[in-house]
Image (spheres, rainbow, N blue to C red):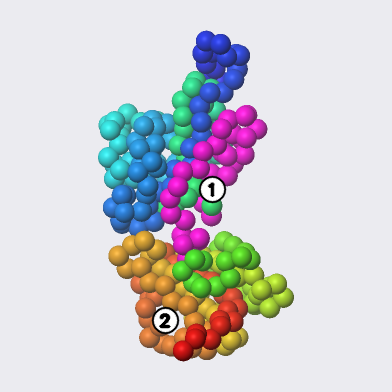
Amino acid sequence: MVTAEPTGRPEGTLYGRLYLVPTLLSATAPEAVLPVGTIETARRLRHFVAETPKAARAFLKAIAHPDPIATLEITPIDPLPFALADAETWLAAGHDVGVVSDAGMPAIADPGSALVARAHQLGVRVVPLTGPSSILLALAASGLDGQRFEFLGYLPAKPAERDRAIRDAVARVRTTGATQLFIETPYRHVQMLASLCELLPGDLVLAAAQDITGEAEAVLAKPRAAWTADDRARFAEKRPTIFLIGRAQNLPTAPR
């Protein structure tokens, strides 16, 4: 490992910071969803660990990084041992390092948590930058309980196991009241929605949030019994989708 020894600091101390850089969720202008401070910080970084380097280069180009993209140091997070080694070397040399996923916030339903854990082991400061998280945006837009919720990641791909996972999620809603969130790949989400409409009790709310922050953004939340064929057709496009199930809120009657 290369170590830096700036004047007045002990040898072996790691001086760089690890920045968690949120990226775009859809084909949107960066300034429409990212704060100025996040964009400016990402523009000054020259060392990155990325879920997919090609996607990272596209993002850096979109935010108009001032340096030629080919001159930036970008290492893939997989295989992880090499990513950790590169990050440690850069941090020890005094460089700030950015972690970027293909979409949204790194380390939240995306790779990056291992880098954050290693940074804490080494005493490196971790700086999360502000930006979009599809999970939180979908939860906020659903009208479901945002005080208690569980994120289940991807449910199993095999139909029998997927249906079992859905029933388990329903049981958790019934026993704990916690909203259940999960994601599905764009090429399987139509089948997921069909299973949800078949298996969920009619009184539970089913919500779907698709293409969050994008031009085709769609969010629908209502009791499963109220979902129609037209509703399901709204989510037939192969776009990133988050599903949520939970209890309907008891709303007070509006004064007349």
Q: Which residues are magenta?
A: 109-138
Q: Is residue 119 magenta?
A: yes
Q: Is residue 134 magenta?
A: yes
Q: Is residue 180 left or right of residue 61?
A: right
Q: Quadrant of residue 150?
A: bottom right
Residue 112: x and y in percent read: 53, 44
Residue at horizontal 42%, vertical 72%? Answer: 219
Q: Secondary structure at mark 1?
A: loop
Q: Earlier in the sequence, mark 1 or mark 2?
A: 1
Residue 33 sits above or below residue 182 on the image:
above
Residue 241: x and y in percent read: 44, 67
Type of amino acid at the residue the image marks with label 2: Arg
Q: State the residue position of label 2.
A: 232
- Alpha carbon separation for disc pair 1 and 2: 31 Å
The count of marks equals 2
Residue at horizontal 31%, vertical 56%? Answer: 27
Residue 134: x and y in percent read: 46, 60
Q: State the residue position of label 1.
A: 107
Q: Secondary structure at mark 2?
A: helix
Residue 31: x and y in percent read: 31, 49
Q: Nearer the viewer, residue 219 or 182?
A: 219
Residue farthest toward the right in the current orientation of the protein: 175
Type of amino acid at the residue the image marks with label 1: Ala
> CB under 8 Å between callouts 1 and 2?
no
Query: Is residue 164 at least partly visible in the picture?
Result: no
Q: Nearer the viewer, residue 10 or 232?
A: 10
Where does the N terminus fall, quadrant-wise? top right
Query: Is residue 128 at least partly visible in the picture?
Result: yes
Residue farthest toward the front in the current orientation of the protein: 256
